[in-house]
Amino acid sequence: MKKVLSIVAVAAISATFVACGPSKEEIEAAEKRKADSIAAVDKQKQDSILAAEAELERQAAEAAEKMKQDSIRVADSLAAATKGGKKK
């Protein structure tokens, strides 16, 4: 009798665990939310990388323009110095 009651108790507990678990639709919805969240993070990461690259390009262009202006100023200074210092 004890064995029969034990088997019935184990079967009832097993059925309770199975019945209380999430349904297939709930599991799929959770997986979809997880995938959507990962996709959103990846998009934000990609956007951040693109913004950083754009900022680097902007800074490089500014630095190149500054170097160009400095070179022109130095060349003008040298030209003015050699023009004024030459004897004719």
Image: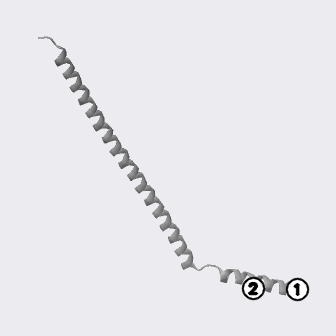
Badge 1 crowding class, 10 Å Cα cut-off, few under 14, some 14 to 19, many 20 or more, is few
The label shown at residue 34 is: none
* Image-quadrant location for residue 76: top left
Looking at the rendered structure, the kind of residue marked 1 is: Lys
Q: Residue at x 48, y 67 (%)?
A: 36
Q: Quadrant of the N terminus?
A: bottom right
Counting residues from the start of the chain, the first of labels 1 and 2 encountered is: 1
- Residue 50's place in the image compared with 71, above or below, is below
How many numbered callouts? 2
Image spot of residue 77 (x, y percent): 23, 24
Residue projecting furthest to the top: 87
User: Horizontal and vertical percent for residue 42?
Assistant: 46, 59
Query: Is 60 placed above or below 78 here?
Result: below
- Identify the secondary structure beneath mark 2: helix
Frontmost of labels 1 and 2 is: 2
Q: Which residue is mark 2?
A: 12
Drawn side of residue 38 relative to residue 5, left or right: left
**Location of residue 41 with respect to 50 vertically, above or below:** below
Question: Are there few (<14), some (14-19), or many (20+) residues within 10 Å of tag 2?
Answer: few
Say which residue appears at 31% left-offset and 41% top-offset: 62
In three-dimensional space, the C-alpha distance between marks 1 and 2, rounded to whole angstroms, equals: 15 Å
Residue closer to the observer: 22 or 42: 42
Residue 4: image location, x then y, percent? 84, 86
Q: Is residue 15 left or right of residue 77?
A: right
Q: Which residue is mark 1?
A: 2
Does residue 53 appear left or right of residue 19 in this picture?
A: left
Q: Residue at 54% of width from left, 79% of height from top?
A: 25
Callout 2, which amino acid? Ala
